[in-house]
Image (cartoon, rainbow, N blue to C red):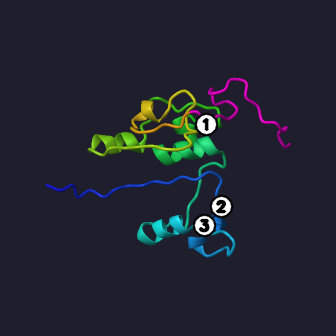
Amino acid sequence: MADTRPNILLIMSDQQRLDTVSAYGLNDICRTPNIDDLARRGVRFDRAFTPTAICAPARASILTGVYPHRHGVTGNDSLLSPDVKGMQEYLHDTGYRCGYAGKWHIDGARGPSEMGFTGKDFIGYAFPGSRVLPGLQFDLPPLN
């Protein structure tokens, strides 16, 4: 019997504002034809909110469905609490095969393979606190 479950594709870009996606019609300069095609054939969010403006905690919240104080990733160098399951684990339990490609930036100690994903990991992406390149620092001082 054919599998009737829908395919699920979650795309997370990093620091991409709404006005840089041409499907929303807010900018005549940026052209995003592939994203626009996905928006026409799939789901496009008209309203989206983040629990935090920091990258890693926001990504962890998307995967786990809980706030940063619950999943433990409260900064870009924090670790995901091992007792919190991500959507990939729930989907795997129902028979889905879950892949992950691209920038991880959720948990510096564990990569996608250790958290229930199959496929290519790009865990080598480094940022200060990522534990990939110990001692890595930004070349500019933080803004205060």
Q: Residues within 10 Å of mark 2 (few under 14, many from 20)?
A: few
Residue found at x 47% / y 45%: 63
Q: Main secondary structure of the magenta part?
A: loop
**Whole-percent x and y of residue 110?**
50, 29
Q: Amino acid at mark 1?
A: Tyr
> Is residue 98 toward the left or the right of residue 27 in the image?
left
- Tell me the number on the disc at residue 125: 1
Q: Quadrant of the C terminus?
A: top right
Where does label 2 land, which residue?
A: 17
Task: Name the N-terminal-most of marks 2 and 1.
Answer: 2
Where does label 3 land, which residue?
A: 21
Residue found at x 63% / y 45%: 55
**Whole-percent x and y of residue 96?**
30, 46
Kindly report which numbered mark, 2 or 1, lies closer to the viewer in this rendering: 1
Q: Please provide the residue range marked out in magenta.
A: 124-144
Q: In this orientation, which residue lies closer to the viewer: 48 or 14?
A: 14
Task: Name the N-terminal-most of marks 3 and 1.
Answer: 3
Q: Amino acid at mark 3?
A: Val
Q: Quadrant of the N terminus?
A: bottom left
Residue 24, picture quadrant: bottom right
Separation (CA) of disc 2 from disc 1: 22 Å
Q: Is residue 82 above or below residue 26?
A: above
